[in-house]
Amino acid sequence: MKAFGFLSFGHYAPLRGSQTGTAADMIRQALDLGVGADELGVNGAYFRVHHFAPQQASPMPLLSAIAAKTERIEVGTGVIDMRYENPLYLAEELAALDILSAGRIAIGVSRGSPEPALRGYEAFGYTGSTDPRGADLAREKFGLFLKAIDGEGIAPADPHQAPAGTLLPIEPHSPGLRERIWWGSGTRATAEWTAELGLNLMSSTLLTEATGMPFHELQYEQIEAYRAAYKAAGHTRPPRISVSRSIFPIVNSKDAMYFGRRSDGDQIGIIDGFQSTFGKTYAGEPDDLIAQLKGDSALMAADTVMLTVPNQLGVEYNLHILESFAKHVAPALGWRPNTDGPVQGDPIV
């Protein structure tokens, strides 16, 4: 582990104890959390994207605002659901964000997780999928998106304005943007596919397999499969690899009240019809956390760890969680603050 950031799901609802009663509360607090995290030396501010739910959606305005108000922190998503996206418009938006942020983005995309709406992407106007989960639609769109950010010609030009046969690329174009795109993977097969494309790997908080092995060992095998496939494909750029974890250092009585009994084991459940393994929550005093996390093989193999934060508890408390991890835990795991420069992936050997 070289870097860590926070991953916010952006929950909001007028519930007792929540500081994010409305969407306005959530979005404004997310901006403040990103700015505060940058000042603490945290490496990334990442946001989950959901539709038809009281959570963060359409993240580009928020990411742009955080990038404009910060100097070093990486801004990104974990993940954008490609089923709901216009791939060409997304390519334009991300190129602009990449330029505005001077390349400080880490955009995770994927087929997406189950949403509250039944085939909700069809309500957005994206029809024609023959897969009940829309995976075929997501892959098709993603292929077009990659062509667009690579600067390939996409649309035929008006023959009155350009030579016959001219294909126009999407503008603006941001060189190197592909190197800052991640695919969110929950299986070994998708990890290997991601590697073949030369993209970064954002390993999910769950894996759609349940073999009896601990979650971190399953995830480590996924990472190793990705690295092997990346090398076999002939890619030479050191790729980025991230994992997500729920980690809560207990350093005061409030931490103990919220998370003192939250450490648990891995869980097995069903998602999208697949038996899946979900990672456990880590909570404890710093020395105990360090020992536990050093034994998490996937976390130690990744360059970046995304800490899932309880955004409903407000900016001040979430900054406390991040500061506690940065001060008492992360240095022992190999962390380098954002003042040391952009995060680099590990070379493939």
Image: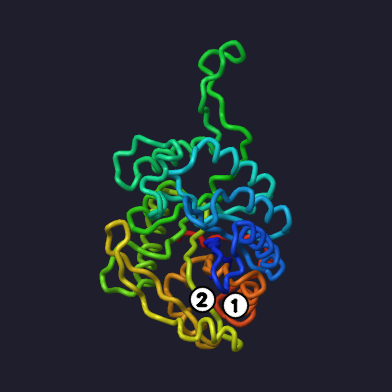
As helix, strand or loop, the secondary structure at mark 1 comes to helix
Q: Residue at x 37, y 50 (%)?
A: 193
Residue 338 appears in the figure: yes
Give the total of numbered labels.
2
Image coloring type: rainbow
Q: Secondary structure at mark 2?
A: strand
277 vs 146: above or below:
below
- Image quadrant assignment for residue 82: top left
Residue at (55, 77) in percent of width and height: 333
Q: Is residue 201 left or right of residue 217?
A: right
Q: Nearer the viewer, residue 230 or 312?
A: 312
Q: Identify residue for label 2.
A: 247
Labels 1 & 2 near each other (Cβ < 8 A)? yes
Q: Quadrant of the C terminus?
A: bottom left
| Amino acid type, callout 2 | Ile
How far apart, in angstroms, are the residues tagged by discs 1 and 2? 8 Å
Left or right of 260 on screen, residue 95: right
Crowding around mark 1 (Cα neighbors within 10 Å: few <14, some 14 to 19, many 20+) is many
Q: Residue 344 at what x, y percent from top left?
A: 58, 60
In this orientation, which residue lies closer to the viewer: 69 or 224?
69
Q: Position of residue 252 (x, y in %)?
A: 61, 88
* Residue position marked by numbered label 1 in the rendering: 325
Instruction: Give x and y (percent) for residue 171.
Output: 61, 33
Tell which circle, 1 or 2, labels the residue nearer the N-terminal end. Answer: 2
Look at label 1 and name its amino acid: Phe
Mark 2 Cα-neighbour bin, 10 Å: few <14, some 14–19, many ≥20: many
